[in-house]
Image (cartoon, helix red, strand yellow):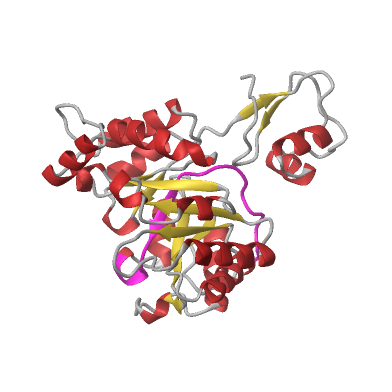
Amino acid sequence: MRAFGQSEPSTPRQQGVRHLAWVWQFKSDGSPGHISEILSPHGLGIVVKTHDGTDWMATYDKSSQAVSGTKQVERLASYFEEAGVPFHAWCVIKGIDPKREAQMCGAVLASGARSMTIDLEPHAGFWKGTPQDALVFGDELRRLQPLAWISISLDPRPWIIKRVPVAEFASFSNELAPQLYWDTFNTGANLEKFALENQVPGPEGVTPRFLLEATIPRLAQFGLPMQPLGQGSTINTESWQEFVDQAYVNDMEAVSVWRFGVTKCDVWEALAANPPRPHKYIVQPGDNLTSLARSWNTTIAEIAELNEISDPNFIRIGQELLVPRGARVHLPI
């Protein structure tokens, strides 16, 4: 595999849903070369932190590969994509200068990121704005990137989530990425708070199953698909099988891992052994790509590219189609 910074002819962007691994700082999580050597053979994508508020990550990450601006985003996107690792980005939004923050997100998307995930938390160093600031951010981001995939990552514990304007952020987003850290949340204080919300874990305490069952009804009101974020540093890596299984039971297509630098090898193996389950559709009499694109709120080109359809004017009854990420349709399979 080539070293980061060496050029190669570009290759087509791979399509379809992937499990994703989050990267915080290259100085902590490892070099792009090391990361791609793990993620590529396991069929995983990457979510790289590009900025914090209005500061590029090079302000905090002293690695030479840290994001210092859009040129570095372009280099990272090109490197990972050519290595077979779909490149996504994430950032922390504070709401202090929402328009400028939106412009930075738009610039990252324009520089090669497939999606932008906004880390929305009320803790120190995170969101400080108002609901109106959230709408200002969303209006500017959608002005710049009307078709971009925007995900909101949040701490879904009920006493935490009520402190951020989720409804306002959900109004312009495509997906929710709840942070389900079962080991971190499995404390006496959290158990008491869950009980006050009439959510009582079983004798095993906070488990992946419990968190998904507690979280899904709470977030369902926003009407967005979910790609949950699991704990890579978990003590019991077998819990990842439970996490993935329960995600699939609840019609989720894939999961994500926080974060690369602390995740055990067994987790990567578990994800490779349990690949994403993108939604599928069986072509019915009267269907064509025009009607399906309209129904799925996507484009003919996206359906054709995802399914490697050379002639978009021809699909056959009974043909199995992969549904583009996030489309909410009645699926007969």
Residue 60 x %, y %: 34, 78
> Does residue 85 appear anywhere in the picture?
no
Q: Position of residue 149 (x, y in %)?
A: 60, 53
Q: Quadrant of the C terminus?
A: top right
On the picture, is 262 further left or further right than 324?
left
In this orientation, which residue lies closer to the viewer: 87 or 99? Answer: 99
Q: Residue at x 34, y 80 (%)?
A: 62
Q: Looking at the picture, how far across and down is residue 238, in whole percent?
A: 25, 34
Residue 76 percent location from the top left of the image: 52, 68
Determine if residue 104 is in view: yes
Q: Residue furthest right?
A: 313
Instruction: Using residue 215 as the reference point, say whether residue 140 is left or right of it.
Output: right
Main SS class of the magenta portion in the image: loop
Q: Is residue 317 magenta?
A: no
In the displayed structure, 56 sits above or below 18; it is below
**Snapshot quadrant of residue 180:** top left
Which segment did they paint magenta? Answer: 9-28
